[in-house]
Amino acid sequence: MRQLRKVLVANRGEIALRIMRTCKELGIRSVAVFSEADRQSAHVRYADEACCIGPAPSKDSYLAIERVLHAAETSGADAVHPGYGFLSENASFAERCAAAGLVFIGPPASAIAVMGDKTHARKLMQKAGVPVVPGTPLAVETVEEAMWTAESMGYPVIIKAAAGGGGKGMRLIESPEQLAQSISLSQSEARSSFGDSRVFIEKYVVRPRHIEVQVLLDSHGGAVHLFERECSVQRRHQKVIEEAPSCAVAPVLRDRITGAALRAARACGYEGAGTVEFLVDQDQEFYFMEMNTRLQVEHPVTEWITGLDLVAEQIRVADGERLPFTQSDLAMHGHSIECRIYAEDPASGFLPDAGMLIRHAPPTGIGVRVDASFDEPGEVSIYYDPMIAKVSTWGRTREEAIRRMARALKDYAIAGVKTTIPFCLRLMESEVFRRGDLSTHFVTDHPALSVPRPVPYGQARAAAIAAALGQRVRLPAGVQPSGQWQQRRRR
Ligand code: MV4
């Protein structure tokens, strides 16, 4: 029997809407929280109730534990969904929810805490028989210790912060001289960034793929994996494209890596939806990197290939129910790709481009899903993440999913801010991406893809004149005039 009746969504933007849609399907009321900057936002209007929790800066609103808990109490919510980012991986927030009698729709606080400390996580994974990259068992204290470890593994090595994650506080080291200089520098950087100076050393895996496994566990010992996603295409540790399944994962590797992911989840007492990230090297060896103890941005590709609603499953297990399926009930069907669309200007080295969206008409059609939270006109705020939308497509084959994505990106009508749509389209149409020749160095290995194709002057001028006249002209595939040349549709 379902107990949960009202869920407070402690987030904003597309993920807040995404969660509320499932609540509505399940007959659960939703409560939005919002900052003063988000008063007019779509998630506020979509919710059954909404509470303003403070001024625009996240630390005074979406990150303010007391304010979020106060909103939960005054609205009479019986559960909190943290989404991703903000408080989603904050163990003390999960604890405070429990202490206030609220169901935290996420893992136990203890699982968040152990996975949040990368050295503890490494140790636990080793014990659980999950392969980890060779490295220091715990934090390194002295330069001598670091030098000795690196010497025994061979260079290059990588320094990581124990409290880091997602690429923050990492440093690639190619020689003993560089290591000697970098240890204390990394320690003081870690102290100022994370309030925790501990760092550790790993052997550097050259040209790895980023492959992650979605897991789902209930509180009765039920545990399944939902196959893998590949997220190798990243720029500055920001994922750009994700897909499921990975074209680099053959059935044998899939068995091994999903088995390891479930051992990882069980070892930390996990419940709910989580993701175990691995580096996979050129010899198909894989190594535990970290576990994300939240619903991830890229979960739609897993939903596409499994047909499941991950938020509904999260709510079900948080409510104490059993998973309604076992591993043998699950299968993957077809292929899915997601492109994250950011409000960024490629001409300025991909700096965030905030402002008003004077036009926002997302693509639709067979096999196309758009998770966005903007209306027209909408606003991309400087206070928050510049991700505008996620476009995901499904196809029977990878090829079909890619073709659909290219079509969807061409159909995406957006104006007012610069976006990464043209960049994503160039990726979709590139031979290397279509071949599936991916690694975490993909974007730097193919710099031409980051540069707009020149728009022939005559066509650019025609587009500008057409825009001024409110008309539409046909341009060659993949050519997207932007800024003042942005095309408008005839009203
Ligand atoms: C590594 C690595 C190579 N060797 N660790 C980046 C994010 C953080 N979770 C860990 N990261 C890496 N760790 C070892 N031992 C390369 C990366 C890495 C990376 C990983 C996944 C996706 C994109 C990346 C881009 C640069 C570096």
Image (spheres, helix red, strand yellow):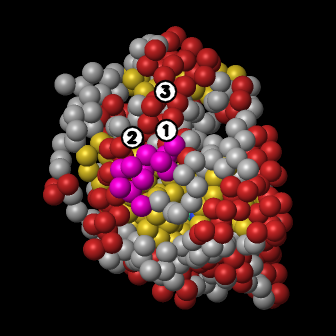
* Quadrant the N terminus occupies: top left
Nearer the observer, 225 or 257: 257
Mark 1, mark 3: which one is toward the viewer?
A: 1
Q: Earlier in the sequence, mark 2 or mark 3?
A: 3
Label 2: which residue? Answer: 268
Mark 2 residue's CB less than 8 Å from ligand 1: no
Task: Tell me whether the residue at label 1 lies in contact with that at label 2, contact meaning CB atoms closer than 8 angstroms.
Answer: yes
Q: Earlier in the sequence, mark 1 or mark 2?
A: 1
Nearer the observer, 235 or 3: 235
The numbered disc on residue 114 is 1
Task: Tell me whether the residue at label 2 lies in contact with that at label 3, contact meaning CB atoms closer than 8 angstroms.
Answer: no
Q: Residues within 10 Å of mark 3 (few under 14, many from 20)?
A: many
The numbered disc on residue 94 is 3
User: Which percent across, then down, holds residue 252?
Assistant: 28, 74
User: Which percent across, then down, holds residue 169?
Assistant: 71, 52
Instruction: Provide the secondary structure element on which disc 1 rests.
Output: helix
Nearer the observer, 466 or 368: 368
329 sits to left or right of 234: left
Ligand 1 positioned in quadrant? bottom right
For residue 350, say whether it is visible: no
Specify the segment rendered in magenta: 120-131
Q: Is residue 124 magenta?
A: yes
Q: Quadrant of residue 383?
A: top right
Magenta span dominant secondary structure: helix
Mark 2, mark 3: which one is toward the viewer?
A: 2
User: Which percent across, then down, holds residue 463?
Assistant: 75, 77
157 sits to left or right of 177: left
Q: Residue furthest top?
A: 74
The residue sitting at 53% across, 63% down in the picture is 134
